[in-house]
Image: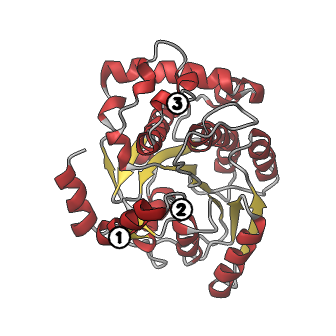
């Protein structure tokens, strides 16, 4: 990533707010994951200001989710705000959540914002995968695929004036990813479990790069007439809660750094709302930054990117075969 361009965006570009006078969400239902704190909470607040009728806060901790709901409800008495459990570390929880979403009368958009950063390699006990890759990529991919038929079904209903939208919250740090695991000579997912490859920053960057590959491949199958899928970069934000595990002297230094160059979550969340509410079919299969289409990370592009995309997709479909993801996507084709 060009450091000067990064700093220019941080200091001189301010994503525009989505105004209620321009976008009214009355009658619509939306979902925001990881919505009890940081970007998810602020995006929920902004969505509610657009007069949405019902908003699902998808959270791991129901107690914290309820506190967020009460805070949001005070400013949006017209809306139904639900708190639903979703643990992105657990495939069964993801499946249960998606099944519950299928009972909704409609679903207009979903913002998949939940994500983590770990300071040490941590293996998920239930899946056997690195926890960062599990939450930020594997479970995100599963949830996205399970929600797509629900979003597509909503698009066929007369009350829905446009296709459902699925927005995955990415990061421009995908450009910084070294992604050495791809050169391990074997399974990429297995390589993420090897201590020699773990670096707390690069693991997060790479997980966000994997999300870009995911969006590109999903959009080769799913037409924008059924669901608009995009990935959005909110910029580097303070107050997001992402770096809570970075403590001590390093945590203090990093906290000062974030406050010096970071955006507020209020500003960063504008990009999430724009991607899910404002952007339409032209954003299908695209990477968005500062509320506009921007290039994917270089590693995603070109023939080498296509080859890597196929490797990742093959491993992903094998990993998620228990949920019949191939069959679900096959039915989504035009």
Q: Is residue 282 above or below residue 213?
A: below
Dot 3 crowding, Cα within 10 Å, few <14, some 14–19, many 20+: few
120 or 303: which is nearer to us? 120
Residue name at image x 59 percent, y 54 percent = 114
> Is residue 43 shown to the viewer in this render?
no
Rendered image quadrant of residue 179: top left
Residue under the point 74% across and 43% down: 90
Nearer the observer: mark 1 or 3; the answer is 3
For mark 1, give the secondary structure: helix
Which mark, residue 256? 1
* Quadrant holding the C terminus: top right
Q: Please identify, in this view, whether the residue under mark 3 or under mark 2 is nearer the observer.
A: 3
* Neighbour tally class for label 1: few under 14, some 14-19, many 20 plus, Cα within 10 Å: few
Quarter of the rendering containing residue 33:
bottom right
Q: Residue furthest top?
A: 185
Disc 2 designates what residue?
Answer: 244
Describe the element under mark 2 as helix, strand or loop.
loop
Distance (Cα) linking label 1 and label 3: 29 Å
Which residue position holds label 3?
Answer: 195
Residue nearer the viewer, 311 or 132:
132
**Does label 3 or label 2 sit earlier along the sequence?**
3
The image shows residue 306 at horizontal and vertical percentages of 39, 21
What is the C-alpha distance between the residues marked 2 and 1? 14 Å
* Left or right: residue 8 compared with residue 228: left
Q: Is residue 120 above or below residue 84?
A: above
Number of dots carrying numbers: 3
Q: Which mark is residue 226?
A: none
Direction left: furthest residue = 4
Q: Residues within 10 Å of mark 2 (few under 14, many from 20)?
A: some
């Amino acid at each position: 990533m060009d450091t000067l361009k990064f700093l220019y965006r941080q200091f001189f570009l301010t994503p525009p707010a989505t105004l209620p006078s321009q976008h009214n969400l009355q009658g619509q239902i939306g979902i925001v994951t990881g919505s009890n704190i940081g970007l998810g909470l602020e995006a929920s607040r902004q969505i509610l200001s657009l007069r949405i009728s019902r908003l699902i806060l998808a959270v791991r901790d129901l107690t914290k989710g309820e506190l967020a709901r009460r805070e949001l409800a005070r400013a949006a008495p017209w809306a139904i705000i639900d708190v639903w459990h979703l643990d992105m570390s657990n495939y069964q929880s993801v499946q249960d959540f998606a099944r519950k979403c299928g009972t909704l009368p409609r679903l207009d958009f979903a913002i998949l914002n939940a994500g983590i950063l770990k300071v040490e390699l941590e293996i998920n006990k239930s899946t056997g995968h690195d926890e960062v890759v599990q939450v930020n990529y594997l479970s995100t991919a599963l949830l996205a695929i399970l929600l797509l038929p629900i979003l597509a079904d909503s698009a066929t209903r007369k009350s829905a004036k446009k296709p459902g939208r699925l927005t995955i919250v990415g990061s421009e740090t995908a450009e910084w990813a070294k992604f050495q695991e791809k050169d391990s000579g074997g399974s990429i997912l297995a390589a993420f479990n090897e201590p020699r490859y773990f670096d707390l920053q690069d693991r997060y960057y790479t997980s966000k790069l994997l999300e870009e590959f995911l969006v590109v491949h999903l959009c080769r199958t799913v037409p924008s007439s059924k669901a608009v899928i995009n990935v959005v970069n909110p910029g580097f934000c303070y107050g997001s809660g992402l770096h809570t595990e970075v403590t001590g002297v390093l945590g203090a230094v990093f906290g000062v750094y974030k406050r010096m160059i970071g955006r507020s979550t209020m500003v960063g969340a504008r990009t999430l709302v724009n991607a899910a509410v404002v952007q339409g079919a032209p954003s299908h299969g695209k990477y968005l930054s500062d509320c506009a289409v921007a290039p994917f990370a270089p590693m995603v592009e070109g023939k080498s990117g296509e080859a890597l995309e196929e490797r990742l997709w093959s491993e992903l479909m094998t990993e998620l075969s228990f949920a019949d993801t191939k069959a679900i996507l096959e039915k989504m084709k035009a």
